[in-house]
Amino acid sequence: MSKILLYILLTVIILTVGFNLGNFSSDQKTLSSQTVKVETSQKEVEIEREYLPNKTESDKIVSTSNKRLNDEVQALLKKAEKLLDESKNSEALEIYNLIIKKLREHSEPELLKHFATACMTKAFLYQIYPNIDQDVAIEAYTMVIDKFEKSNDPEFLKIYMSAKVQLARLLPLDEKLDIYDELIKKFEHHQNSTLQKEIESLLIDKSFELMGKDDEESMKILDKVIEKYQDKESNIKLPENIQISILNNIELAIITNNENEHYIELAEKFMSDSPDTKPLIDMLSIVKEAQDLNQDEALATWKEEHGDYYFPDWSFQELERWAYNIEDTETKARVTEYLNTFINHKYNIPDKNIQYEDPYAPAKDLIKNRDNRVQNDANNVETRERTEEEIYNDDAEIKNEYNNENQNNINEESLITYPNPYENAQPIIYDEDPYASEIYEAIGE
């Protein structure tokens, strides 16, 4: 019995030691995974010495604490933002590069956010003067895409989508649309409401990209966005981008020669309390009906009812393009006349043909008189050659007249004040990008 007990005791001791050794090995692996050896260049050491003065020499080479690393990166980010405020973009970029190098192997959520901030800001800085380099910007966005692509966290997926969209905007239209389609396919059935909103915005962006190139497809895309809202109760306030989609489809229906009554009904149902709805719908109705009939009476009514509305968030570009391509001469002239009336109203330009006085008319008269004198001399039997002094005096008089009139014209123009067409415009509010505030704050906007 004692031998058996001794054997059992020895077995337990061996197993216990083995287990502890295993734990020790596991702990070492864990510690190793948390230990990040940063190969530092002399420049990086100098940056850390300047902006992280409390680090010890050993800390400069190895950081064993993610908490410590997080604090260091936050300090570096704040310094980079300060440099951006001082327009020291190149120095800020050195810090962002260091942050990216420190964090690219980490997977902790807070550090990943800092990594994304550094990459996205770096990409943005390489899209503006004087550091413009599209390839570097694409590379920075790609690092974020690669890091977050396989995440299941909606917050990180939103960062992934943002980086993907920003990258797409640096590419030709066909490649941009391919990326939009890829994202739509990947996330259009995602259950997260935030990602659903992002997809709605992406569909609208795609629709805008196709306007003037494939108006039918552009309209179908907006139909897809509108579809899930059209059966809701009328007291529901639609998101801003859905309201924009409805109004844009009223316009696109005119451009594509489709019926727009359905969209008008939706606008009247959901957007009757908006100050934009009635003026825009009535304006679009006048432009549409102008294809067939005179709209002077309707235009007079519009001015009476909406004379103080100046289309603060509306662009007439698509309607102008459409009107320009109308083949029938009379129809084109009629539509263009009413369209120009609204465009002039947007910029508060008087609705009449303005005759501008030629500021150089007096000088031109002098030239004409001189030429007449020369011609008369040539036709006169008693023609004599003009003296050099006479030629000089004529030319000097003309030159002085030009200079005087030009200076008067400049002085008069300096006193002219033009109305600001966007003075009363309300800003469009989009779904917040998780890093937008940090980026804009960093660049001082």
Image (tube, rainbow, N blue to C red):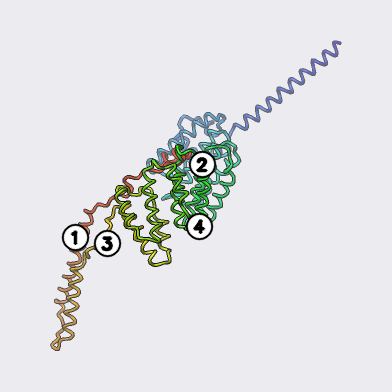
User: Farthest residue in the bottom direction?
Assistant: 381
Label 4 sits on residue: 214
* Gap between marks 3 and 2 measured at Cα: 47 Å
Q: Which mark is residue 222?
A: none
Q: Closer to the camera: disc 2 or disc 1?
A: 2
Q: Position of residue 275 (x, y in %)?
A: 36, 43
Q: Residue 51, located in which quarter of the rendered image?
A: top left
Q: SS at mark 1? A: helix
Q: Earlier in the sequence, mark 3 or mark 2?
A: 2
Q: Earlier in the sequence, mark 3 or mark 4?
A: 4
Q: Position of residue 425 (x, y in %)?
A: 35, 45
Which amino acid type is marked by label 1?
A: Asn
Q: SS at mark 2? A: loop
Residue 445 seen in the current view: no
Label 2 sits on residue: 231
Please state which of residues 312 and 306 is positioned toward the viewer in this rendering.
Answer: 306
Q: Position of residue 402 (x, y in %)?
A: 20, 66
Q: Are marks 4 and 2 in contact (CB under 8 Å)?
A: no
Label 1 sits on residue: 408
Q: Which mark is residue 353?
A: 3
